[in-house]
Image (tube, helix red, strand yellow):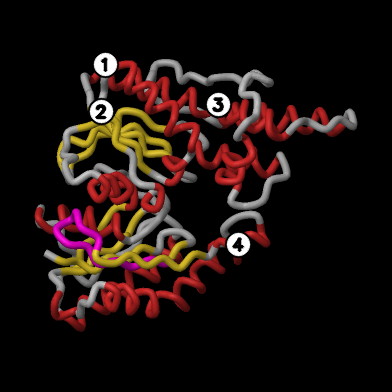
Amino acid sequence: MKLLAIESSCDETAAAVVEDGRKVLSNVVASQVQEHIRFGGVVPEIASRMHAEAITGVVRQALEHADASLSKLDGIAVTYAPGLIGALLVGVNFAKGLSLSSGLPLIPVHHLRSHIAANYLTYKELEPPFLCLVVSGGHSHLVEVLDYTRFSVVGRTRDDAAGEALDKAARAMGLPYPGGLNLDRIAKGGDAHAYRFPHPRVDGSPFDFSFSGLKTAVVNLIHNASQKGETLPVKDLGASFLSAVVDCLCDNTEKAAMERGHQKIVLAGGVSANSVLRERMAHLCKRHSWQLFMPEIALCGDNAAMVGAQGYYELKAGNVAQMDLNACATMPIEA
């Protein structure tokens, strides 16, 4: 079964052709990073316009690279939630037009489910159930993946997502966009014990995260030093802050896995590309003799191949949309 997949939830216009949810036949991504660098972050209106300009060419390239035509496909999968509403609408409406003209089924795919499914492309042997840490610029979730289309959230952030905290801390340190990526790079070789940061806990919810106070702590530290005319070593500061964020992610994952009895741990989302998180999670799982699955770096960020992977299982489960499908800025993964 071959699916055309489309992704436009934020600032990457992407299309892919995926076979049986496990084999990537093509994967094309048009990035907007260079455009948004000028503003220090994604500007939603600009992102939407650039999606509209790029999507036809990206889809055409994906079909050409896979040596496929719509007549050879079995469906069209598209990210419909969550994300930037204007950006999502570009992909959803384009997919609806293709579905209507070709007669192919339209498959709505949740963005976070797609990130989890990126692991199916990296590990052909991976099957649910397992515990997944989904961590990105907009989300920090601990999810029990019960089956390919059944999910249960056991922990989530109460305020900022981990990726958001990393991005804002990086900006306060004077690093360019994308902040999390540049923070990871500059922190290499830094002293992770140079500065002590809090490790917030959520009373009564041991698996939930909170990164707002952690972010405020580093911003205040930088501002106080600036007022005194002091310059802080960014390498050490970045390493210390990154270490604190990763500690929180790993600690809650460990507690959830032990209490819920999981021995298969999966990473997903844009922040799963972070080198410190990958290293710490590998050590954690080795210590407990757990299996660890992490998507290859190229599949950590937003892409359409992961949409096609999840789309395959959504179609098998009968999750097909009609022409009244709409984009949604927020949507729980269980929906």
Find residue 111 and report its horizontal and vertical position in percent: 33, 52
Report the amino acid beneath label 1.
Glu
Tag 2 residue: 291
Q: Earlier in the sequence, mark 3 or mark 4?
A: 4
> Mark 1–mark 4 contact, CB under 8 Å?
no
Foreground pick, 136 / 289: 289
| Nearer mark to the viewer, of 1 and 2 | 2
Tag 4 residue: 36
Picture residue at 70% right of the left edge, 33% below the top? 219
Report the amino acid beneath label 4.
His
Tag 1 residue: 259
Region of the chain picked out in magenta, as a range: 13-24
What is the secondary structure assignment of the residue under circle 1? helix
Crowd band around label 4 with a 10 angstrom C-alpha radius: few (<14), some (14–19), many (20+):
some
Report the amino acid beneath label 3.
Ser
The Cα–Cα distance between marks 1 and 4, rounded to whole angstroms, is 42 Å
Picture residue at 20% right of the left edge, 68% below the top? 106
> Mark 4–mark 2 contact, CB under 8 Å?
no
Which of the 4 image quarters holds residue 6? bottom left
Residue 18 lies, with reference to residue 217, above or below; the image says: below
| Nearer mark to the viewer, of 1 and 3 | 3
| Nearer mark to the viewer, of 4 and 2 | 2
